[in-house]
Amino acid sequence: MFPNSVFPTSTLRLTALALAASLAGCSLNPFADDEVAATAPAPGNAQSGYPAPSSSAGSATTSGVAEPAPYEPALTRVETTRLADGHPDEYVVQVGDTLWDIAAMFLKDPWFWPEIWYVNPEIENPHLIYPGDVLGLVYIDGQPRITNVRASTYRLSPQARVTPLSEAVNSISYEAISAFLSSGVVLEKDEADALPYMLRSKGDHLIAAAGNEIYVRGVENDVAGSRFNVVHVGDPLIDPDDDSVVGYQGIEVGSGTLRRGGDPGTVWLTETSREAIPGDRLIAEASDIPLNFFPKAPSTQIEGSIMAVVGGVTQIGQYQVVVVNRGAGDGLSVGDVLTVYRAGEEVDDRFGGGKVMLPDEPAGTVMVFKVYQGIAYGLVMEATQAIHVRDAVRNPT
């Protein structure tokens, strides 16, 4: 039994997080359908124009990846939103800004950003943020709101739209995750049998490397020219809750192009980092990481743990990628922010006698960017102390 669903993995750094609508036309913006009045009603008002609450937590696609659920803003939280010390009244968006950094300028808790974002109906594409836009802090019915008070010249000039600066800044840049997309995988256990696999190498080779062809099974319906990543099935991923196997670490072998479909088909290996051997799995090359989403608190209560960290290190720091043992089936969705807690130690009480369990302590913040039915990938946004595998992840407070 080998796994099927894939998470490309690699340590990555975050270079471009910002508020944007989906480039494919399918926006993850929670306010994309808002009709904004001249004066916004107070949060929680039935006439506010916010989307009605929904119990949907996202559904799994045929590939096992969960579709992001519509965001449901926790409107009652706006009353507790705390502004950051020394926050600006206005801020000009710079090239390379991230949404997380912008939100942190205004808010103590950046994941409250969707709950105070107020679209300006007088600006073309008011849901997008571009370099040069001026964001302003305003108060509506006594509540703080961030709005786009002045659009940049890039937004106003159609001719400028051909330049990189003219595009709305993505939540995560493709460049930031390109290594993650190609350098490793996590394989879910339950979908193992659907993955194509290497039958043997072509010719007299026992193993194969770049420049060799291999025979594969499971690609009869794929089109010649399709790209595949080749992965060796590695160590199991153990759920800390019950010690069950929920998936496997994938070890990058290389990539190749389908020369001929059928059963068996033929794949030409274009690059390899280690030898390909019979039984290695093939994963269709894809970049389906959503690049546009809001950091936000989960819509359901999440109690989970970190199962693994990309790169195999034992201590986890900022901008590293972790795998958590919760997914769409638990109500987790893309953009959800979780607080990491280090388990409290058991210590001797020298004065009262016996042993005392110290409380769990916050250790950092993880933002989910890839969700499958039972597990998810998150990026460590903040690390106030060392984070470890088996540390707990919960809703932010």
Image: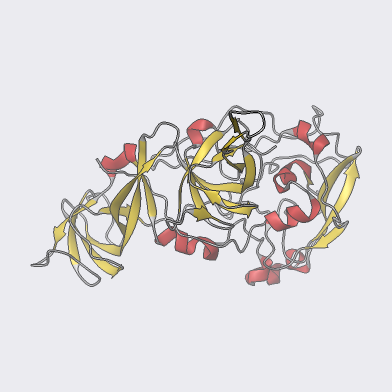
Percent position (x, y) of residue 35? 77, 39
Percent position (x, y) of residue 140? 89, 41
70 on left or right of 196: right
Q: What is the number of callouts on the image?
A: 0
**Along the viewing direction, whichever of 359 and 113 lies nearer the viewer:** 359
Percent position (x, y) of residue 349? 62, 33
224 on left or right of 143: left
| Above or below, 237 relative to 181 | above
Task: Tell me the quarter of the picture where residue 131 sits.
Answer: bottom right
| Residue 174 seen in the figure | yes
Q: Quadrant of the C terminus?
A: top right
| Above or below, 91 relative to 237 | below
75 on left or right of 14: right
Q: Which residue sits at x=65%, y=52%?
A: 384
Q: Which residue sits at x=72%, y=48%?
A: 110
| Residue 124 seen in the figure | no
145 on left or right of 289: right
**Along the viewing direction, whichever of 112 and 265 lies nearer the viewer:** 112
**Along the viewing direction, whichever of 214 and 368 lies nearer the viewer:** 368
Q: Quadrant of the N terminus?
A: top left
| Above or below, 95 relative to 337 | below
Tell me the colour scheme of the image.
Answer: secondary structure
Q: Which residue sits at x=8%, y=67%?
A: 204
Percent position (x, y) of residue 117? 77, 46
